[in-house]
Amino acid sequence: MLAKLKTWFSLFVPEGALLALTVVVLRLDALQDSLPDFAHFYPYAVFVVGALLAWRFQRSRLLFALLVLALATWSIEARVPSAAGRVAFRASALLLPLNLAGLALLADRGFLTPFGLLRLGAIAAQVIVVDMFARTAPAATAAVLGYPLLPAGLFAWTPLSQSALLAFTAALVITAVPLIFEINATGRGFLWAIVASFLALNAPRTAPASAIYLGTAGLILVVAVIEASYLLAYQDGLTALPARRAFTEALQRIAGQYAVAMVDVDHFKKFNDEYGHDVGDQVLRMVASKLAQVEGGGRAYRYGGEEFAIVFPGKAVEEALPHLEAVREAVAESTFTIRRRIRRRGAKAARRRPEASITVSIGVAAKDHRHANPDQVIRAADQALYSAKEAGRNRVRS
């Protein structure tokens, strides 16, 4: 139950929370007089700052998404009650979600590379085509873009055309389905940006809400990229545990007593050579999942290779030992099924799915008068780990 709550929470925070905050702000009576002025600079300030960050972090998808949002903001603000104005609005409502969903599916491939120029050209082509039809045949184009596929009475609640609603539905499905299998900051950002864009295009034409919602859509994407960059530096991509950099900084933040355990997967090199690196990665993920469940206030980290670390703030060695024994037993009692063919075996043996037992050795040390700084504590824990290996593996030593 707790794991499901964490999953839903990670889908909403922080991007969904930003959008919820925007909804609340737009409904506060005390702020209504200042919203029009705020709407004039807020979205463009977000787009400019976001573009600079995109350039600095080499995130081409963010730059192109902000460009699309800026074009939509401009077309909505410049909309006039005419056929050409209806073309601009309906085209924006149709193309904006599709562009955002398309960018969500693509990888960052640079700005001035052939891939980047192709994407920029596709956006420019849309602007040129929409402008051409808005100038030459505005009434007919507006009619085509607003053509009802179903009875119009079903959609009286929205100013969007049915084709735009279909585009938003498709975009939400395209961005939401991958998040079912793996929640990531960038994909989540595009999902909430599409939701914010939908609210923007449903806002009254004369209200500042449209520009503010689109600005928030851009802010959501900027926050998502910052979060993804943070995770790239501080989270291990294979195991999803905090990485070595996070481990080092965590030790530096602890002012008082703490214990550090170094954990090593037994016979991992032999296992890797026998079954291959893909299976080796599966082993590391399995071990990481067990270590992540350590109790006693401990937190697990990926230290490097087949080695992990667990930090127990405020704990002495004696206090950490029972929790380390529990996690060692949890790993040893887990049966690991080999999910690929074994090397150098016959065809009949290769078709079987053998099971393997995985064990870990653990060395633990704590801060004391002999080990006053993190490096000394880690070295002492490494020495204890070596002692556990020498004593036969699959054990805890201090």
Image (cartoon, rainbow, N blue to C red):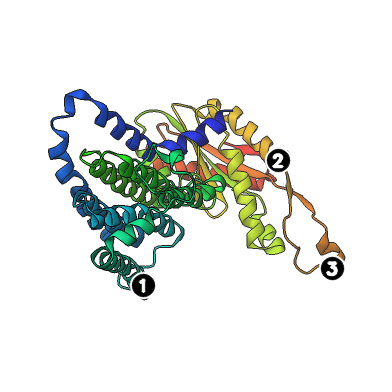
> Which residue is at a point 25% across and 45% down the rendered structure image?
215
Cα separation, mark 3 vs mark 2, equals: 30 Å
The location of residue 147, given as percent across then percent down, is: 41, 54
Secondary structure state at the residue bearing disc 2: helix
Other residues around mark 3 within 10 Å, as few (<14) / some (14–19) / many (≥20)? few
> Which residue is at a point 68% across and 35% down the rendered structure image?
329
The location of residue 259, given as percent across then percent down, is: 48, 33
Identify residue type, mark 3: Ala
Q: Nearer the viewer, residue 318 or 11?
A: 11
Quadrant (top left, top right, bottom left, bottom right) of the C terminus: top right
Secondary structure state at the residue bearing disc 1: helix
Q: Are marks 1 and 2 in contact (CB under 8 Å)?
A: no
User: Which residue bears the numbered disc 3?
Assistant: 347
Q: Nearer the viewer, residue 347 or 395?
A: 347
Whether residue 331 is visible, yes or no, is: yes
User: Which residue bears the numbered disc 1?
Assistant: 118
User: Which residue bears the numbered disc 2?
Assistant: 332
- Horizontal arrangement in the rendering, residue 334 relative to residue 290 (left or right): right
Quadrant (top left, top right, bottom left, bottom right) of the N terminus: top right
Closer to the eye: label 1 or 2: 1
